[in-house]
Image (tube, rainbow, N blue to C red):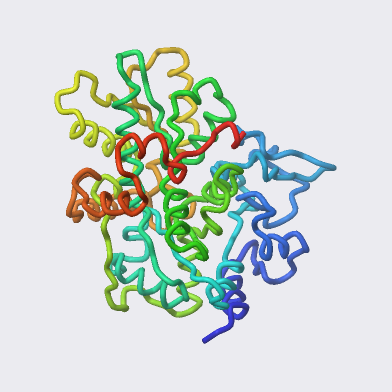
């Protein structure tokens, strides 16, 4: 078995930039990013940016004003950067890249001082090949050294139920509306940092990622949790002051693929270790419109024939999200449940997805169709988990759930 240092060196050698490998010729900044990713923004420079032939396109693309010029060099503010990835696409010189948590994660799983659990995003379906089923991915992660794999889609189920109950409780007229709090940290950051007056319309629910991390740590207090998904913004979300500690590290699908490749682990060849308990509702969170569809169907089951059903509009992509919020503010859009996703197509279009967006969406839809249950209300595993978490009633679930709620004021 390779040491984690040997494994990581192989991963670095795969990442050529500008005709050379990152392992060669990097400066102390790069070393600190590798050893201490928590100190840095979700997006980092692969090369020093001084002169730019494209008039700082990265800085002008950032709606959060996270890229600043200091002494003639660009600086990415870790406090302001959300990890949306727009700047990475805007940089035609390809000098920006996602920060990486690979080294501390490999160190944790190799040392085995604590059990390390992988929390896989709903968008994971198909990302490691058609033959790499969820059960085989679980086997592959265990081969790396993880104690186990938890599907975050199960917690998307739980948050779907919470969102539906919140909607049924609070949206009483055609002028009321709810902004979904689930899923996308870029959407939430946009509301929280730029459109603060809309925060009261956002139920104080954590994302499925944070819910998964908190529940795993409640059931296994000494565990380390590692979220795996297509999103750089999750690296920032995991550090938000009011929810920090639920998820210790965030790996992208590309980082995990690099680990599999370097360790010569081929998920498609491994045995099935299947324990999937999520419903269709939780699995479709991975694509635009999935949250709205999941909540809508759950509301219909909660209150059949209710006069006000979920009338939703969705936006995907940072600019589309901003446009939708502006129209909400101006009152020029109709609806009572609004969903935003920072990436085109939703999580399947994330900046560190392996599959092309359309293929990722098709894989998610196939996986959703395989689900034994349509909604969390039909899913006995959701009800069993809520019982294990001591939720004895709907009121307790909504009002006394420290595990599933967050304080947006503390996150400011």
**In the rendered image of this protein, does residue 158 appear above or below residue 4?**
above
Q: Position of residue 366 (x, y in %)?
A: 22, 54
Residue shown at 42% from the left, 42% from the top = 183
**In the rendered image of this protein, does residue 260 appear above or below residue 254?**
below
Side of 239 relative to 381 (left or right): right
Q: Position of residue 224 (x, y in %)?
A: 52, 64
Which of 216 and 41 lies nearest the eye of the viewer?
A: 216
Asked which quadrant contains residue 270, the reply is bottom left
Q: Quadrant of the C terminus?
A: top right
**In the rendered image of this protein, does residue 281 appear above or below residue 223?**
above
Residue shown at 19% from the left, 52% from the top = 369
Q: Residue lying furthest left in this view?
A: 305
Q: Residue lying furthest bottom in this view?
A: 1
Q: Position of residue 400 (x, y in %)?
A: 42, 38
Which of 63 and 273 lies nearest the eye of the viewer?
A: 273
Q: Position of residue 57 (x, y in %)?
A: 64, 38
**In the rendered image of this protein, does residue 31 appear above or below residue 269?**
above
Residue shown at 44% from the left, 64% from the top = 118
Residue shown at 56% from the left, 53% from the top = 245
Q: Residue lying furthest right in this view?
A: 71
Which of 89 and 397 lies nearest the eye of the viewer?
A: 397
Which of 25 and 180 lies nearest the eye of the viewer?
A: 180
Asked which quadrant contains residue 327, the reply is top left
């Amino acid at each position: 078995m390779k040491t984690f240092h040997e494994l990581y060196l192989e991963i670095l050698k795969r990442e050529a930039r500008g005709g050379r490998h990152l392992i060669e010729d990097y400066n102390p900044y790069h070393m600190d990013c590798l050893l201490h990713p928590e100190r840095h923004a979700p997006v980092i420079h692969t090369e020093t940016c001084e002169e730019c032939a494209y008039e700082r396109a990265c800085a002008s693309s950032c709606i959060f004003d996270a890229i600043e010029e200091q002494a003639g060099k660009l600086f990415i503010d870790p406090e302001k950067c959300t990890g949306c990835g727009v700047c990475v696409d805007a940089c035609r010189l390809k000098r920006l890249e996602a920060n990486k948590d690979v080294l501390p994660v490999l160190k944790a799983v190799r040392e085995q001082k604590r059990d390390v659990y992988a929390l896989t995003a709903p968008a994971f379906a198909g990302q490691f090949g058609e033959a790499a089923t969820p059960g085989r991915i679980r086997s592959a992660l265990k081969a790396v050294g993880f104690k186990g794999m938890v599907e975050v889609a199960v917690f998307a189920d739980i948050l779907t139920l919470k969102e539906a109950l919140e909607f049924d409780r609070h949206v009483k007229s055609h002028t009321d509306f709810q902004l979904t709090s689930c899923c996308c940290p870029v959407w939430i950051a946009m509301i929280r940092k730029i459109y603060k007056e809309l925060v009261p319309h956002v139920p104080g629910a954590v994302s499925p990622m944070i819910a998964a991390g908190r529940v795993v740590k409640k059931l296994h207090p000494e565990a380390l949790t590692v979220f795996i998904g297509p999103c750089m913004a999750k690296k920032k979300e995991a550090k938000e002051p009011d929810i920090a500690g639920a998820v210790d590290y965030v790996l992208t699908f590309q980082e995990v693929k690099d680990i599999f490749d370097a360790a010569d682990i081929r998920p498609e060849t491994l045995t099935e270790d299947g324990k999937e308990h999520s419903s269709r509702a939780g699995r479709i969170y991975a694509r635009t419109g999935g949250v709205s569809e999941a909540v809508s169907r759950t509301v219909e089951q909660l209150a059949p024939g209710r006069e006000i059903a979920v009338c939703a509009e969705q936006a995907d992509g940072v600019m589309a999200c901003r446009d939708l919020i502006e129209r909400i503010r101006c009152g020029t859009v109709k609806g009572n449940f609004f969903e935003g996703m920072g990436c085109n197509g939703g999580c399947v279009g994330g900046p560190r997805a392996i599959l092309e967006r359309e293929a990722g969406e098709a894989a998610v839809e196939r996986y959703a169709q395989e689900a034994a249950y349509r909604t969390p209300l039909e899913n006995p595993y959701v009800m069993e988990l809520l019982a294990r978490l001591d939720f004895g009633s709907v009121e307790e679930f909504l009002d006394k759930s420290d595990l599933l709620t967050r304080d947006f004021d503390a996150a400011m």
